[in-house]
Image: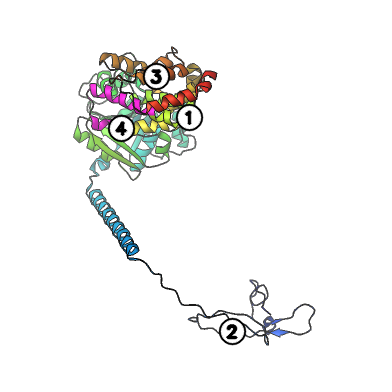
């Protein structure tokens, strides 16, 4: 008869050994069965069997010796190849890690060490995220945020929270908010500009008297100024009345929320001044932010187009074809304006485009989705507390295209939709009816798939 593991001395409640614990009386029986402790070598491979005295035990059969697995010569060769490949990959990875550690050990940190004060112009989402990132780089660093909203200013100083944009995220204690431009800019070593492009000129003109002529400005704003079609590299020196104002442009695929959550992010610093670009790289580079340097906004308009395709439920084939065509159009215009092809295919080019077009956190993509779903543009913009730069940039892009004599079918369609001259549904069909043989339009071969997709969803589009 096998002993129950719930009976003493095997029960979890057993705490004291006594002879009575070594007996077991079956139900309806007057006889006690005493158990004999089993002494077993710790090196024994035999099975343990608990039984009552007098019971017969059927021994377990001895374990069979392991059988050798026969492998064919071809299998042995295949296994050797796998081992060799894994060894090659491991060695390559180890070399990469050693190279990385060697560079990090020699990386200069003097810029961060001698930086005492940084100012961030603007209290929006990205300005707040960048202020938090810089403040986390060094506890002794003063990071001043120049904001226009007194409530946000008070919230940051009293509760270390931007109550409007990041109410659930605590800011570092060395982030200080102010509404006084003179106080914020005085003694600053670096200045981050995070004001939307459409308001940048007037904003900078208002604080120009407090900006030191040698203060490096790091532009976080993306897009083109409406009516003038100027970029930030043109706006900054003119608004500050200093053509030699040092500045760099920071761009790349980045959402403020992910930056606040300290998720890995890669950005590009572009400047004609290589020394300044390297200094900004030292200031910002960390375990969660990789900064590349480059010497050297259309993506916002393309993101609206991508959102429209999503809102119309035209499918993944249509989305891929449209973004591909949009990337081509951006490349045509940018190269005409003097941009380098390496910039367009890097983080600040295709990387930024992919993130803005395909991720729901994109404000411009959200505008497009809602337009494609049938909402009015005015209603969409009035319900948003952040600026979607693509809406105001679309018209400026088309004016530049006319200036440089470049045809941009997708981006032009977005401009007409924004101007309420074309519905999203009609714009899609107009794009699909463009001549297939015109090389200057460079419609991708995959657009044939889009035509089939649109034809298949014609009833859906008609209902919209």
**Residue 147 appears in the figure:** no
Q: x, y percentage for residue 140?
A: 33, 42
First in sequence: mark 2 vs mark 4 = 2
Q: x, y percentage for residue 121?
A: 35, 27
SS at circle 2: loop
First in sequence: mark 1 vs mark 4 = 1
**Which residue is tagged 4?**
348
Residue at 45% across, 13% down = 420
SS at circle 3: helix
Q: In the image shown, does 296 or 329 lie closer to the viewer?
A: 329
Mark 1 or 2, closer to the camera: 2
First in sequence: mark 4 vs mark 3 = 4
Q: Which residues are magenta?
A: 321-347
Dividing the picture into quarters, in which one does residue 451 lie?
top left
Q: x, y percentage for residue 265?
A: 35, 39
Q: Is residue 287 magenta?
A: no
Mark 3 or 2, closer to the camera: 3
**Which residue is tagged 2?**
38
**Which residue is tagged 3?**
431
**Which residue is tagged 1?**
164
First in sequence: mark 1 vs mark 2 = 2
Q: Residues under labels 2 and 4: Cα distance?
A: 74 Å
Q: Residues under labels 1 and 2: Cα distance?
A: 72 Å
Dividing the picture into quarters, in which one does residue 227 lie?
top left
Q: In the image shown, does 238 or 427 lie closer to the viewer?
A: 427
Q: In the image shown, does 408 or 441 lie closer to the viewer?
A: 441
Q: Is residue 59 left or right of residue 252?
A: right
Q: Residue furthest bottom?
A: 54
Q: Residues under labels 1 and 3: Cα distance?
A: 40 Å
- Answer yes or no: do the residues labelled 2 and 4 have beta carbons within 8 Å? no
Q: Residues under labels 3 and 2: Cα distance?
A: 86 Å
The local crowd at label 2, few if under 14, some if 14 to 19, many if 20 or more residues have their Cα within 10 Å, is few
């Amino acid at each position: 008869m096998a002993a129950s593991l719930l009976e003493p001395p095997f029960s979890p409640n057993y705490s004291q050994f006594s002879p009575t614990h070594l007996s077991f009386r079956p139900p309806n029986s007057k006889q006690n069965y005493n158990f004999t402790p089993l002494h077993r070598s710790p090196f024994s491979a035999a099975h343990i069997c608990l039984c009552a005295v007098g019971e017969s035990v059927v021994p377990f059969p001895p374990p069979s010796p392991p059988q050798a697995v026969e492998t064919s010569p071809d299998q042995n060769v295949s296994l050797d190849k796998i081992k060799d490949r894994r060894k090659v990959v491991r060695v390559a990875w180890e070399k990469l890690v050693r190279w990385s550690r060697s560079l990090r050990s020699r990386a200069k940190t003097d810029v961060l060490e001698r930086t005492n004060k940084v100012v961030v112009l603007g209290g929006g989402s990205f300005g707040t995220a960048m202020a938090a990132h810089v403040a986390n780089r060094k506890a002794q660093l003063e990071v001043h945020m120049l904001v226009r909203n007194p409530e946000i200013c008070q919230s940051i100083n009293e509760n270390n929270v931007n109550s409007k944009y990041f109410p659930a995220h605590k800011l570092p204690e060395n982030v200080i908010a102010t509404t006084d431009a003179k106080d914020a800019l005085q003694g600053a070593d670096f200045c981050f500009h995070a004001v939307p492009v459409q308001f940048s000129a007037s904003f900078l003109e208002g604080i120009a008297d407090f900006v030191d002529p040698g203060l490096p400005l790091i532009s976080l704003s993306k897009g083109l100024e409406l009516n003038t079609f100027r970029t930030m590299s043109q706006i900054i020196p003119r608004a500050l009345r200093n053509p030699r104002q040092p500045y760099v442009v920071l761009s790349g695929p980045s959402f403020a929320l992910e930056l606040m959550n300290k998720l890995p992010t890669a950005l590009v610093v572009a400047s004609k001044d290589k020394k300044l670009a390297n200094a900004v790289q030292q200031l910002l580079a960390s375990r969660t932010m990789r900064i590349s340097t480059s010497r050297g906004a259309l993506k916002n308009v393309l993101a609206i187009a991508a959102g429209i395709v999503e809102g119309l439920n035209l499918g993944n084939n249509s989305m891929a074809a449209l973004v591909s065509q949009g990337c081509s159009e951006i490349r045509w215009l940018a190269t005409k304006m003097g941009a380098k092809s390496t910039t367009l295919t890097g983080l600040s080019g295709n990387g930024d485009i992919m993130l803005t077009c395909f991720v729901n956190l994109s404000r411009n993509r959200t505008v497009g989705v809602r337009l494609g779903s049938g909402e009015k543009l005015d209603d969409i913009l009035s319900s948003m507390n952040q600026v979607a730069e693509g809406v105001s940039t679309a018209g400026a892009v088309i004016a530049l295209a006319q200036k440089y004599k470049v045809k941009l079918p997708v981006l032009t369609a977005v401009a007409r939709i924004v101007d309420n001259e074309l519905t999203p549904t009609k714009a899609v069909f107009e794009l699909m009816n463009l001549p297939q043989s015109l090389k200057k339009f460079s419609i991708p071969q995959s657009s044939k798939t889009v035509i089939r997709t649109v034809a298949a969803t014609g009833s859906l589009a008609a209902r919209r």
